[in-house]
Image: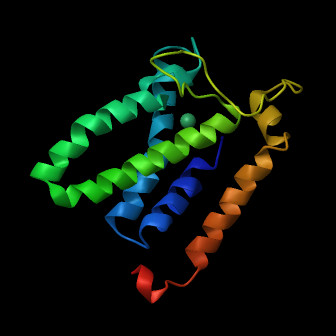
Amino acid sequence: MITAHLPAGYLTGRAIAHSGTCLWMAVIGGVLPDLDLIWFYLVDNRAFHHHHYWVHIPGFWLMLAALVLPVLQVTKPHWLHPALAFLAGIFMHLCLDTVAGGIKWLWPLSDQLYRLFDIPAQYGHWVLNFILHPVFLLELLIWGLALWAVMRPAHPSNR
Ligand SMILES: [Zn+2]
């Protein structure tokens, strides 16, 4: 995914809550993994695919959740639902990155990046290869659904 992580995070949050902390934690989780691009460009000088960083590895988040969620449940139970919404956003991000980018779903057993589609390098810039591939229609669909959700009046049971 190039552009759809923000609206997908929003849709994830809307599936959990109409507004409030859980919604915004899902949005943050939906975009947070790609903050590794700062490190990718400024520190590692694009030495390898940024999906190899820990923020793009499901096993890392599962281990972190296994450590943090029980502690939250005991010490700060009101933070548990926002934390779960954040994780939902993270895993939505990782699922969308699986479409064409590749994610290490079997780490630590394997370092292979798993993806559903390979985007052939037909054009001069990688962004053009993604935008002109049919898989980009999924990004447009996600944006359309998110805009529809934003404009949709709140249902009283969702408040
Ligand atoms: Zn990503």
Give the quarter of the figure containing the C terminus.
Answer: bottom left
Vertical relation: 113 (above or below) 94: above
Q: Quadrant of residue 158?
A: bottom left
Query: Where does residue 124 sit, x and y in percent of width and height?
Result: 85, 24
Determine whether, in the image, residue 67 is placed left or right of residue 100: left
Nearer to us in this view, 25 or 158:
158
Determine whether, in the image, residue 98 is placed left or right of residue 159: right
Vertical relation: 124 (above or below) 95: above
Taking the spot 31% from the left edge, 39% from the top edge, the residue there is: 65
Outermost residue on the bottom side: it is 156
Query: Where does residue 133 sit, x and y in percent of width and height?
Result: 84, 39
Tell which quarter ligand 1 is in: top right
Nearer to us in this view, 45 or 78:
78
Query: Where does residue 52 sit, x and y in percent of width and height?
Result: 52, 20
Query: Where does residue 57 sit, x and y in percent of width and height?
Result: 47, 28
Outermost residue on the left side: it is 75
Determine whether, in the image, residue 147 is placed left or right of residue 127: left
Outermost residue on the top side: it is 47
Taking the spot 51% from the left edge, 21% from the top edge, the residue there is: 40
Taking the spot 76% from the left edge, 28% from the top edge, the residue there is: 126
Q: Quadrant of residue 59?
A: top left
Determine whether, in the image, residue 46 is placed left or right of residue 129: left
Taking the spot 70% from the left edge, 64% from the top edge, the residue there is: 144
Q: How is the protein colored in the picture?
A: rainbow
